[in-house]
Image (cartoon, coloured by chain):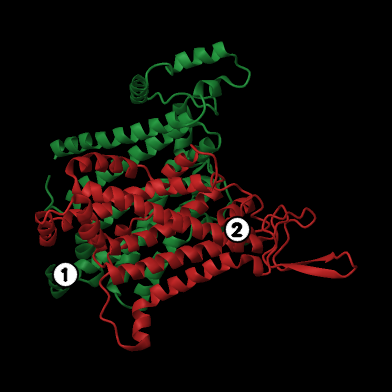
Chain colours: A red, B green
Amino acid sequence: MSVEPALLAGETATPPPKPGLSGRLARDGGIIFGAVVILLMALLGITAPWLGTKSPSEINPTFRNRVPGIEQATRNDDGTTRTFTYRMGTDSLGRDIYSRVVYGARISLVIGITVAVFSVAVGLFIGLISGYIRWIDAIVMRLMDGLMAIPAILLAIALVSLFRAGLMSVIVAIVVPEVPRVVRLVRSIVLSVREEPYVEAAICAGTPTHLLLWRHILPNTIPALIVQGTFIVASAILLEAILSFLGIGIPPETPTWGNIMAEGRGLFRLYPHNIFFPGIFLALTVLAVNVLGDGLRDRLDPKLARRM
Amino acid sequence: MLGYILRRLIATLPVMLIVAVLVFLMLRLTPGDPAAIIAGDNANNEQIALIRNRLGLDEPIFTQFFIWIANILRGDFGESFFFKKTVAELIASRLEPTLALSLATIILAVAIAVPLGVLAAYKHGTLIDKVVMGFSVLGFSVPVFVIGYLLIYLFAIKLNWLPVQGYQRIADGVGGFLQRLILPALTLSVIYVALIARMTRTSVLDVMNEDYIRTARAKGQVEIKVLFKHALKNAAVPIVTVIGLGVALLIGGVVVTESVFTIPGLGRLTVDAVLARDYPTIQAVILLFSLVYVLINLAVDLAYTLFDPRIRY
């Protein structure tokens, strides 16, 4: 779900760090916690095939809706038996929830990061031009106002309905509502920086506009964009899960946390684990990204809130 | 003041016009001929041409846009492809649950969040403060539907205190209406509480060092009145602002919550319309929600004078 950093921000500046490890932990605890959890999730996604999983889309009609921890013994061709433990049970098609949850980390992280990169890139480009060239600004900002007047989830839902369901259309549908927020942030920084003496000096020295924007103005936006980008990762992961959960996101056979939960909805009363296991992973990941964002904001850009 | 309200109302027109253009273009960009969709599978070319003519689809795109806008201003949102009803009827029949859920959520969220935020500010730096702020970050991170199913599991399945899902119209009995409203409203309010509590804490903290707080304490005012009368009132403007901005989250949350609790409201209608690719309904719902969002934030701007007499329009 999209939350503007301005709403999240407003914390008092961090006190000067105490020396030593405990001081650093107190100051950067959020950054460290966030980064470690995200790295673990990434590792989980990358090494999924070697973590005792089976194919996440392998259906098993004789072994549907089983509780977590159940074992299934299968007989091999040579007469020996081997057992497979379904750590988180199976869903209504007999697929292994544990495998689906582990593989689901891939989609969530890929979507979170891709959406953040695209939103920041597009927003940066539009924001730089809009902040610097007055006549474009008037048009662009009205368009952005219009886009921001549509609640983010609704806009994403409407956009998804335009394309065929798939990874790319979900990414586009989540990027569009995020872009205006980046544009506003970048534009506000450009507006304040363009009055700085060094920018005026560069103009006097005859620097062409594109070089001026690239060399002298763009670097000022980077700390704020890192913070904003982190929050976009969190909201993109949530939004993808929401779209998939509603049945309008990634096609249901793909293992994503939202899809696993969507599948578990029907039999929730009897088998709540279908929703709770992916839910825990999803919440933990989003929490880690948000905490990382908070920590980065305090370190890089305590005044971000004021600029919005 | 009246002149200001009028000017602000007029200023929302361009924004709504842009929303309308975006929503209109979305429909035009979709693959497929709406006339063919309405006509169904067994229609011949002449029938499709007739419907196309009736809908004005053979006019130039600008003319189509103005016809569309003129119709909407008269309350005619067109006909639903899927539900075979006019969109206006469809929306009217789905309005009550969404309105009830939203209002209950806002009341619940403000009632929980504001005292929590004030408490956190008052106990600044203590464990209570950290717990409230921790809850706030958590509230932003746990998806609405996970909270919803967690509450259903706890209160409806394990404890058996409340019904699992569904909605009862207020006309069919207030008791059942409230019983079925509690869990969805609680679910939806979590993210809102997180948002408001956080802003309340920051905003109250900002005013706690002001002279008038010291004066109020010096004259022997009881602490609770210092906090809720002197501090909170002066801290109100950012809090009210965030309540207004949070309506976007609320609207998004309504869509999800209504799906979790199978409430037949506008949110559920939105999802059903998207699944059925029922574009007239999608357009109408987005326009309506955006208008509500814009108007609520206008009302919030106007409410500033109530809290801060220094702001004059």
Q: Is residue A182 above or below residue B206?
A: above
Q: Residue furthest right?
A: A79
Q: To which chain does the residue with label 2 belong?
A: A
Q: To which chain does the residue with label 1 belong?
A: B
Q: Residue at x 34, y 42 (%)?
A: A147
- Cα–Cα span, label 1 and label 2: 49 Å
Asked whether disc 1 touches disc 2, contact meaning CB atoms under 8 Å apart, the reply is no
For the C terminus of chain B, the quadrant is: top left
Tell me the element at label 2.
helix
Q: Which amino acid, mark 2?
A: Ile
**Residue beneath label 2, please?**
A275
A223 lies left or right of B94: left
Tell me the element at label 1.
helix
Q: Quadrant of residue A214?
A: bottom left
What crowding class fits label 1: few (fewer than 14 Cα within 10 Å), some (14-19), or many (20 or more)? some
**Residue beneath label 1, please?**
B213
Horizontal and vertical percent for residue A225? 32, 60
B162 lies left or right of A180: right
The numbered mark at residue A110 is: none
Residue B236 visible in this rendered orientation of the protein: no
Q: Residue at x 52, y 50 (%)?
A: B179
Horizontal and vertical percent for residue B88? 44, 27
Q: Residue at x 37, y 55 (%)?
A: A3
